[in-house]
Structures are given as structure tokens and as C-alpha cells.
Amino acid sequence: MYTEKVMDHFNNPRNVGIIKEPTVLVQVGDPHCGDSLLLSLKIEDDHIADIKYKIYGCGAAVATSSIASELAMGKSLDEALKIDEQTIADALDGLPAEKLHCSNLAAGAIRGAINEYRKAFPPATTDAET
């Protein structure tokens, strides 16, 4: 049984699409269930200025991607890295046990995108750090 929040995000997903000229674009998938998530981020001043996604998956995958995009929007990269599977499930007022892997997909995509960005644009070190 899905919560009211899950159904709302499934029926009215937020932030769907692909950012034109994203700072980073990643695709992740779950080989066990076949879900696939394409996530694009616009990063400005070490913050997520925009986030969009395309999801191929079940209702729970749509809902977790939607709520994860809302949770990450405007956050610093360090704050966004703290969005984990449980944060996403809690924000939806819970998920059935057999659908918790959907929150893993969304959280993993955010972490993966930030890690890819930081590989391409490592933070500058100051003289005090050297």
C-alpha cells in the first residue's frame, strides 16, 4: 500500500526533464528490476541550482525520483550528499519494503552526479590547506 505522498509524487512528478547544458549528467540503473534514471544537475557556487530527471520505472521509482529532486534543489553539494535512502523514504511517509530499492536508485544518482562533478571540478585548495 502506498502513502498519499507517494501517490501525489507519482501522479504529479516534480522536476521532470533534462536540463539544457547541464553541469553534470548521469544515468544509473537497477539491473534486478530494470529501472533506469537519467539525472541532470546545474551546479552554481557549490549548490544545486537546478535538477531534472527522466525515469523509466514503476510508480515508486517515479515518486522517489520526484521527492529526491525536491530534497536536493538549492542544497549545497555537501548537504545533498546527506540525502540517503532513508531520507527519501521518510519524506514520502514510507515505502513498502519491496520498493525501498527505488529510494536507493534516486539517492545513488544524486551521489553519483556530485562525485562525477567533483572529479571533473575538484574543489580548490587554499594556502592554509597545503
Image (spheres, grey):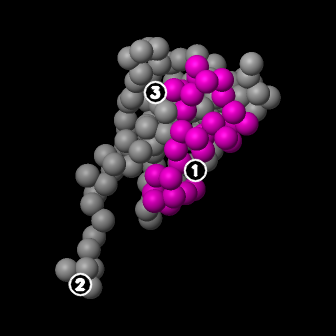
Q: Earlier in the sequence, mark 1 or mark 2?
A: 1
How many C-alpha atoms fall within 10 Å of the one at disc 2: few (<14), some, or many (≥20)? Answer: few
Q: Against 13, is 85 above or below? A: below
Q: Nearer the viewer, residue 48 or 58?
A: 58
**Placement of 117 over or under 108, stated as above or below:** below
Q: What's the distance in space between the residues labelled 3 and 2, CA to CA?
A: 40 Å
Question: Could you tell me residue 42's position as x and y percent?
Answer: 45, 49
Tag 2 or tag 3, which sits nearer the N-term?
A: 3
Label 1 crowd bin: few (<14), some (14–19), many (20+), radius 10 Å:
some
**Label annotation for residue 127:** 2
Q: Is residue 77 magenta?
A: yes
For label 2, the SS is helix
Image x and y of residue 105, in percent: 47, 31
Q: Which mark sits nearer the N-terminus, 3 or 1?
A: 3
Residues in magenta, as a range: 74-103
Residue at image mark 3 = 37
Q: Measure how far apart labels 3 and 1 are at the Cα level.
A: 17 Å
Quadrant position of residue 38: top left
Horizontally, is 98 left or right of 45 in the view? right
Question: Which amino acid, by three-letter code, is at mark 2?
Answer: Asp
Is residue 96 shown above or below 80?
A: above
Which secondary structure dominates the residues rendered in magenta? helix
User: What residue is pinned by disc 1?
Assistant: 73
Q: Is residue 105 magenta?
A: no
